[in-house]
Image (cartoon, rainbow, N blue to C red):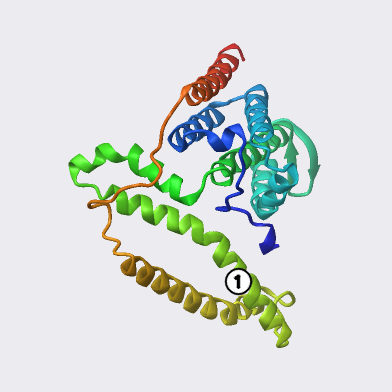
């Protein structure tokens, strides 16, 4: 299960999505999230699904990789579905004792599930197609105006990117620790809730120790390379935008307009 989590991973490539300016990719992702939550109808969600499908096709990220990453949110999808199915009032289609399922509940459940799937798969493409270094530079440049009010933009961007980059590393470390504990006879999959919670202690303690050790090694490595924040820092690769970036942004805004139009006519 842990191996199926692909959040924070970068898949090198030379697709048109990979070559887009990371600043524009962040802005487009924000536009996508906005119009996805603005969608009030299934037609609007269909527009979001079309946007995700088009982006996946252009990025050349294997579809099986997208579905593989979705496995980690299955419990969230199930939880959301149950809440909407059983707790939304409306026209009853099934009633047994205290269990009531309504037509509105089923519709809202399907709507929310599709929205979550679009949201996770669409936003994951940002890290799939952008390296951590360029993502850091893009975040820092987008937040550069905040430096005027003494906000530590560089440190903030660096922390965000390091945290995102460490997700796959910690997942891999957790998988190794769980395998080692199972090899020693630890039972992690049977018993009640309290027993399973206690079984996590031999996993969490080594994981925290490993995380702190990796953080210390990273800090020492940065100090050895004379890292002093953004003071006097130069970059080997400068971010440059081009026509394709503005075209991509215009296309995303067209999808946004389509969602707003569908909301108005519904």
Quick one: label 1, few (<14), some, or many (20+) residues within 10 Å? Answer: many
The quarter of the image holding the N terminus is: bottom right
Tell how many labels.
1
**Position of residue 134 measured from the top left corner of the image (x, y, whole percent):** 44, 45
122 or 247: which is nearer to us? 247
Residue beneath disc 1: 174
158 or 209: which is nearer to us? 158
**Position of residue 56 measured from the top left corner of the image (x, y, whole percent):** 66, 35
153 lies above or below 199: above
Residue 156 is left or right of residue 255, and the answer is left
Residue, far bottom: 184
The quarter of the image holding the C terminus is: top right
Residue, far left: 149
Residue, far top: 265
Q: Which of the 4 quarters of the picture holds residue 93?
A: top right
Does dot 1 land on a helix, a strand or a loop?
A: helix
Residue at left offset 55%, top offset 65%: 169
Q: Which of the 4 quarters of the picture holds residue 172?
A: bottom right
Residue at left offset 64%, top offset 24%: 47
**Position of residue 156 measured from the top left corner of the image (x, y, whole percent):** 33, 52
99 or 214: which is nearer to us? 214
Residue 235 is left or right of residue 112, and the answer is left
**Position of residue 55 measured from the top left corner of the image (x, y, whole percent):** 63, 32
Residue 248 is left or right of residue 84, and the answer is left
Residue at left offset 71%, top offset 36%: 110
């Amino acid at each position: 299960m842990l191996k199926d989590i692909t959040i924070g991973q970068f898949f090198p490539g030379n697709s048109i999505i990979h070559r887009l300016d990371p600043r524009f990719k962040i802005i487009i992702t924000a536009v996508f999230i906005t119009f996805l939550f603005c969608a009030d109808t299934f037609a609007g969600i269909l527009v979001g699904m079309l946007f995700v499908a088009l982006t996946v096709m252009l990025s050349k990220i294997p579809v099986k990789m997208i579905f593989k990453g979705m496995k980690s949110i299955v419990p969230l999808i199930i939880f959301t579905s149950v809440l909407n199915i059983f707790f939304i009032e409306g026209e009853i289609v099934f009633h047994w004792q205290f269990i009531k399922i309504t037509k509105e509940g089923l519709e809202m459940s399907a709507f929310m599930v599709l929205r979550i799937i679009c949201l996770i798969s669409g936003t994951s493409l940002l890290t799939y197609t952008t390296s951590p270094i360029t993502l850091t530079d893009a975040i820092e440049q987008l937040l550069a105006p905040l430096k005027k009010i003494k906000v530590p933009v560089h440190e903030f961007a660096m922390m965000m990117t390091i945290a995102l980059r460490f997700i796959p590393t910690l997942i891999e470390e957790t998988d190794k620790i769980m395998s080692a504990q199972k090899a020693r006879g630890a039972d992690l999959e049977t018993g009640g809730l309290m027993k399973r919670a206690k079984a996590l202690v031999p996993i969490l303690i080594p994981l925290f120790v490993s995380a702190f050790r990796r953080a210390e090694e990273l800090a020492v490595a940065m100090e050895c390379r004379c890292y002093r924040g953004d003071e006097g820092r130069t970059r080997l690769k400068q971010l440059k935008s081009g026509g394709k970036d503005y075209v991509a942004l215009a296309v995303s805004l067209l999808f946004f307009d389509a969602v707003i139009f569908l909301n108005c006519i519904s």
